[in-house]
Amino acid sequence: MTGPTAPQVFRVDGRVALVTGGAGGIGLAAARLLAGAGAQVWIGDLDPEIGAAAAAEVGGRFVPLDVSSTGSVDGAVDRIVADAGRLDIAVNCAGIRHLGSAAETVTDDEWSTVMDVNATGMFRSCRAEGRAMLAAGTGAIVNIASMSGHVVNRPQPQATYNASKAAVIMLTRSLAVEWATRGVRVNSISPGYIETALTARSRAIPERLDVWLQGTPMGRLGRPEEIAGAVFYLASDAASYVTGADLSVDGGYTAV
């Protein structure tokens, strides 16, 4: 018995995709690639102006989405399903970064804010997307985690962020096992240091950037487009037997 051909597995024609945090960075790069491969892309983002512009760029649709609000997340997914009839792919990129505070000085509010967006927000997104996909018996979810869920970054202190991304990786594995026999695949990607707005402040500190590059065997930062390729693989039929995986895309950082 032969399987699908390479052109078939690397197309997502007619599939409906939601990209949370899709207005910039990794999310926008993933949205461009999915749209270029035939998907109907919905950009879900907190900023309506930037989100609508991103959706127009990729020929998709914009839906307001705030991962810190259950009602917002559920409403966004419900709107997509009502309009498009289904949800086939979800790429969860929405997140925030908290740097510069030593753990002993982090306040409860700072901890709660990061965890609510990065960990609980990821769960809210997966829960809503999963309901839609489980009802249809098919779907692929790709969560953006971080190599910070595997290693302790240096020299910047970021215990809160690291903990939130470790939670994303375990959530992904747990959902993948729970939904494996029901047609829904769930995987995550752990990027290394990528040239995005989230890393801009730290990249502007020469001594910090030098440490990052020294710790990365490839000796450079990654580009959002290089993460998008991994997103597309996990979202496509090329990864039809892959679930519960966390794919490191970090220039070799975690291989050392």
Image: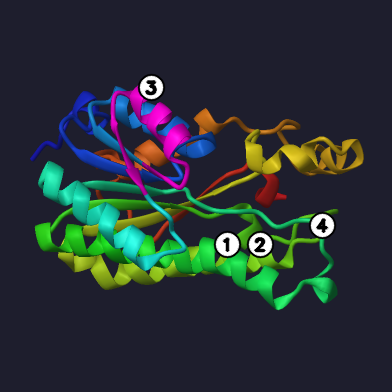
Residue 216 visible, this angle: yes
Measure the alpha-carbon separation of dots 3 and 2.
Answer: 31 Å
Where does label 1 land, which residue? 165
Instruction: Label 2, secondary structure: give it.
Output: helix
Where does label 3 land, which residue? 57
Q: Residue furthest front?
A: 49
Where does label 4 land, which residue? 100
Residue 229 visible, this angle: no
Magenta highlight range = 44-64
The 10 Å Cα crowd at callout 1, few under 14, some 14 to 19, many 20 or more, is many
Measure the alpha-carbon separation of dots 1 and 4.
Answer: 17 Å
> Number of labelled discs?
4
Determine which of the numbered discs, if any, sits on residue 161 in the image: 2
Tag 4: residue type?
A: Gly
- Locate residue 4, reporting x and y percent: 15, 33
Measure the alpha-carbon separation of dots 2 and 1.
Answer: 6 Å
